Image: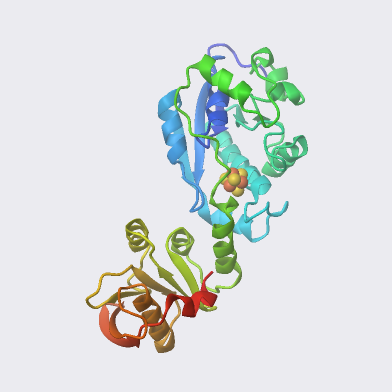
């Protein structure tokens, strides 16, 4: 790597989650006169919403990219395995750097960076983990961690003078004190509270995801989104019932409802949740779904009542004896 002439600004592309560490890493480089751009990747498990706010707050341009298809391929067999739940953090980071690396090459950035801090997360941010990420991103030698640079071997970017190592930091460990002091110094006044990770680190979400990936034969991206809302019940290996828990759930479920393939169930006259039957189903599953839908309305246990089923633009009514909610809890995922 050769030193750039001063007329051509050094350009760096950084991963941005929108958290404080991402913001600090971007500003530390920007304050050296480096032309910084952020990239934030999206899947059903994490969005670029926080990164968009960070971009506005720090005045650093942001590019977003949906990587769901590649991400799901990686999820089928992450080389470093999963964390405590369905979070393949090391391969997730490696994939993000790989994607960013291609953009770096296509768009003439000089190097990549992130806000990773050595020792901040017990498994995914150890020195070995950072090395694993770099190696498996296929962009070894092109990744800088400005917040922990002084704890890590000097990179080509520093050796060649693209980056002034004396203006990088040596933060390590789990304490946030250094980052908060730096935020103060850099004038960052708004940043999200440190979060434990994306939805893949959530125990309940991971149980649902495992069920979808390893039991259900037919999966669509919208099924991944639906995992976030409502109560989920597995009726057969190929068929699932989702029952909303709140007005918000109902709205979100309808956003991912596909009337061409899903069935929607409602009580014919009582208020109740949005209920969606997804996958492959026949009369038996529709009957079960109708009974379960009735259980979440004001119809009393044992009461005979009517559920409307909308499937492929056709509406039918199914008569059911309302069960107790406890009768089908064994189907809950
Ligand atoms: S918490 Fe989620 S987004 Fe973050 S590295 Fe792990 S899997 Fe990737």
Position of residue 181 in the picture relative to residue 291 (left or right): right
Q: How many marks?
A: 0
Asked whether the viewer can see residue 264, the reply is: yes
Question: Dividing the image into 4 quarters, which one contains the N terminus?
Answer: top right
The answer to whether residue 108 is seen in the rendering is no
In depth, the one of 77 and 174 nearer the eye is 174
Q: Residue shown at 39%/86% (left/top)? A: 287
Q: Is residue 44 above or below residue 112?
A: below
222 relative to 263 in the view: left or right = right
Quarter location, residue 29: top right
Residue 147: x %, y % from top left: 64, 24
| Colouring method of the image | rainbow
Q: Residue at x 77, y 25 (%)?
A: 153
Nearest the viewer among 194 and 54 is 194
Residue at image coords 46%, 58%: 228
Q: Quadrant location of the C terminus?
A: bottom right
| Nearer to the camera, 66 or 23 | 23
Q: Quadrant of residue 190?
A: top left
At 48% from the left edge and 80% from the top edge, which residue is drawn? 327
Which one is in front, 174 or 156?
174
Q: Position of residue 246 (x, y in %)?
A: 35, 60
What is the x, y in percent for residue 176? 61, 27
* Residue at the extreme left of the image, as rendered: 269
**Place of residue 7 in the rendered image (x, y in percent of width and height, measured from the top left):** 53, 12
């Amino acid at each position: 790597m050769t030193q750039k002439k001063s007329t051509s600004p050094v350009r760096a592309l950084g991963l941005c989650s929108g958290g404080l560490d991402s913001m600090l890493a971007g500003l530390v480089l920007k304050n050296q006169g480096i032309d910084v751009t952020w990239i934030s990747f999206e899947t059903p498990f994490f969005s670029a919403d926080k990164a968009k706010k960070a971009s506005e707050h720090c005045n650093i341009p942001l590019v977003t990219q949906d990587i769901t298809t590649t991400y799901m391929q990686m999820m089928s067999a992450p080389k470093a395995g999963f964390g405590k739940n369905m979070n393949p953090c090391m391969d997730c980071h490696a994939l993000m750097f790989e994607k960013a690396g291609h953009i770096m090459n296509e768009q003439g950035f000089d190097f990549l960076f992130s806000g990773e801090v050595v020792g901040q997360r017990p498994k995914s941010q150890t020195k070995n983990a950072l090395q694993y990420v770099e190696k498996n991103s296929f962009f070894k030698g092109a990744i800088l961690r400005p917040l922990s640079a002084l704890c890590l071997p000097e990179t080509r970017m520093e050796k060649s003078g693209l980056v002034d190592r004396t203006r990088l930091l040596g933060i390590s460990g789990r304490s946030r004190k250094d980052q908060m002091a730096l935020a103060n110094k850099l004038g960052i006044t708004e940043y999200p509270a440190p979060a434990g990770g994306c939805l893949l680190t959530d125990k309940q979400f991971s149980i649902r995801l495992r069920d979808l990936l390893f039991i259900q034969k037919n999966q669509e991206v919208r099924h991944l989104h639906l995992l976030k809302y409502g109560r989920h019940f597995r009726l057969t290996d190929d068929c699932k019932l989702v029952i909303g828990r709140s007005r918000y759930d109902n709205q979100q479920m309808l956003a991912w409802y596909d009337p061409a393939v899903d069935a929607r169930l409602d009580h014919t006259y009582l208020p109740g949740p949005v209920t969606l039957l997804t996958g492959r189903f026949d009369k038996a599953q529709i009957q079960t779904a109708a009974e379960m839908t009735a259980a979440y309305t004001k119809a009393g246990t044992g009461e005979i009542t009517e559920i409307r089923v909308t499937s492929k633009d056709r509406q039918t009514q199914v008569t059911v004896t309302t069960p107790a909610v406890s009768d089908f809890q064994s189907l809950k995922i």
